[in-house]
Image (cartoon, coloured by chain):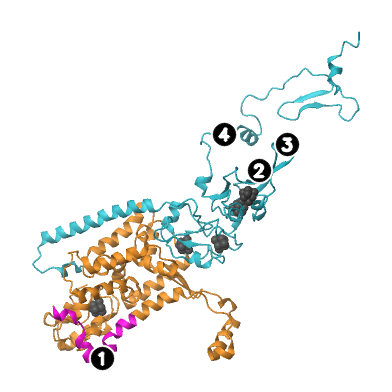
Chain colours: A orange, B cyan
Amino acid sequence: MAKQLIVGAEAIKAKGWFGAYKWLILRRISQLSILGLFLLPVLPGRLSESTGGFFASFWNSLLDQWPSLEGMWVVKGNLAASMTLDVLPLTDPHILLQAIFAGVEPHRDAIIGVIIVIGFYLLVSGRVYCSWVCPVNMVTDAASWLRRKLGIKSSARITRSTRYWMLGLTLVLPLVTGSIVWELFNPVSMLFRGIVFGLGTAWVLVLSVFLFDLLVSKDGWCGRLCPVGAFYSLLGTKSPLRVVATKREACDDCMDCFAVCPEAQVIKPALKGESKGIGPVILSSNCTNCGRCIDVCAKDVFNFGSRFSGVEMNKVSGTAGQQHNPG
Amino acid sequence: MSDSGKDKTRTVNRRQFMGDMLKTACGVGLMGVGLGFYANKADSLPAMAIRPPGALPEDEFLGACIRCGLCVRDCPYDILKLGQLGDDVPTGTPYFTSRTGPCEMCVDIPCIPVCPTNALDHSLTEIKDARMGLAVLVDQESCIAFLGLRCEVCFNICPIRGEAISLEYQHNDRSGKHALFIPVVHSDACTGCGLCEKACILEEAAIKIFPMHLAKGELGRHYRIGWDEKDKAGKSLVTPDIEHQYNLPEGVRYDLQGKGLIFESEGSDELPISSNPLDTLNRGLEDK
Ligand code: SF4
Ligand code: SF4
Ligand code: SF4
Ligand code: SF4
Ligand code: SF4
């Protein structure tokens, strides 16, 4: 029990505070600046070169070139669909799919946008969305942190595959009703859209997610129910970017990574599977690539790598190939 | 995807696994029914919330709008809002309120081409063809035009003045000698932009924009309007009109459904019938 209260203490001792929170800080910067970009209202007009210095003259020359820049939103829209600087469309594939099931024929921008987004997540692993973009992640991370602090152990038994049923539901509902039903409830789009366009009473929904994770079920929302995460996990089944337990032999069984990981079940095969001939790559597409296991390990067991690094590992150590896919 | 097993030990037997699965499926299924019902209720749009130009019919719109807010951002007059949880408007969908921020009917309709899903129909390129709703002069008791005063503010502000809204003259019964200038909206031209509702000088507007389905009546499908059908066919579709014969003094005709009495000798000084009724009444008596 006492152990639970000081998760990561050894890592802080070994690597310093910044070293033990590096990826977490980067993730928060990423999540907040994505939100920030949508909120940055409009680009400024001509700046005074006497006070603005180099940047001002640079900006003014840009304005001479493209006068339409003045007063333009940096990013318009929200995560469902957005337009950056009037050139880069991005579209959320899960929401667009719901719309298509409701009978929509998307326009060119939406199609280009969705191709870019799918391509990106195929590359970096789908659930990077969860840990680097999604605003609800900050809420559920906070709940999980408080859960550890308060030592709350009880957790309702909701299987982690529930999310795939939920995903199915979000796609069946528009088929049946012809309306994008899930987006009336989705706390992910609700929170993001809320911050950008006005929250209304959506905070109640966000608070319930927080309380649900804190009091009812450990990692309950993101880890068991959220169909958005489920959708993105499917995108990431074959993605090259993965966390690898490169120095797994150095693991001293402190269990800190299991304590902080929102998908603790994904770690074991890679970390402890050497004897069974399982490679060190965390292959499960439900690993969110959050990097907390990297931060929290005093022995620097984990690192970002590629899914193929495991194959080489196995060659080196002479064990059988990567047959086991824990995802 | 098969990570469900990780929560349990390896000894979980097949039956238990199937049971869990069934429970989850049932739970999620029930939830789906709940969400569906709630959505059905939450999807109704209040009368005062008007969709942007080109919006598909409401039920299709709710299947098409992905609630991205791009239309909101590209409206130069900043009139569009996204419904928030707790509002009466389906969460996340765009609308405007005519009384506070009407659609200014931009000629290039910038809100439409940015819509990624055709929830705002891209085939609408002429703003005058938009039908966001319909202006209705709902309260003839407080509209001051009906009181005999010259207002016509709604008429004057209308971007399609004369077509969407016109002034009809009526007799002012109260004063007996003035005209009423009554604003009348025509659904074949009104876009429902709401500029008239915004402009109405009253405390509470007498002219309001309603969604089409609230503003318009509909004739029974079997209903045919006789004179329209006659015009279309070019002739009467029932027994042809018989020519009426009237027993009238010379030089006078009677046009039924038309001008009424016609004095053929118009222009000449002498009328076939004297305007003095005594002449007619005394006719015959004089001759004696
Ligand atoms: S395994 Fe590591 S990177 Fe993956 S979700 Fe867990 S803590 Fe995050
Ligand atoms: S037509 Fe113009 S004023 Fe009206 S909603 Fe669209 S952008 Fe806004
Ligand atoms: S741009 Fe289209 S999809 Fe986006 S909020 Fe407006 S109507 Fe909905
Ligand atoms: S809503 Fe009013 S102002 Fe707009 S077109 Fe109709 S009558 Fe004219
Ligand atoms: S502006 Fe209002 S009060 Fe004036 S004529 Fe129009 S409806 Fe009547």
Which residue, given by chain and number where applicable, does mark 4 sit on?
Answer: B224
Q: CA distance from mark 1 to mark 3?
A: 94 Å
| Numbered label attached to residue B176 | 3
Which dot marks residue B175? none
User: The disc numbered 2 marks a residue on which chain?
Assistant: B
What amino acid type should be assigned to the residue bearing mark 2?
A: Leu
Q: Residue drawn 28% across and 75% down?
A: A288
Is ligand 1 less than 8 Å from the beta carbon at label 1? no
Span shown in magenta: A1-27
Q: Mark 2 or mark 3, which has the lower sequence index? A: 2
Residue B120, position as x, y percentages in the image: 50, 59
* Whole-percent x, y for residue B92 in the image: 42, 61
N-terminal of the pair, mark 2 or mark 4, is 2
Q: Quadrant of residue A186?
A: bottom left
Q: Amino acid at mark 1?
A: Gly
Do discs 4 and 3 belong to a common subunit? yes
The CA distance from mark 2 to mark 4 is: 36 Å
In the foreground, B172 or A166: B172
**Local crowd size for mark 2, using a 10 Å CA cut-off: few (<14), some (14–19), many (≥20):** some
Mark number, residue B147: 2
- Cβ–Cβ under 8 Å for marks 2 and 4: no
Give the label, 4 or 1, closer to the camera: 1
**Is residue A7 inside the magenta stretch?**
yes
The verdict on a common chain for dots 2 and 1 is no
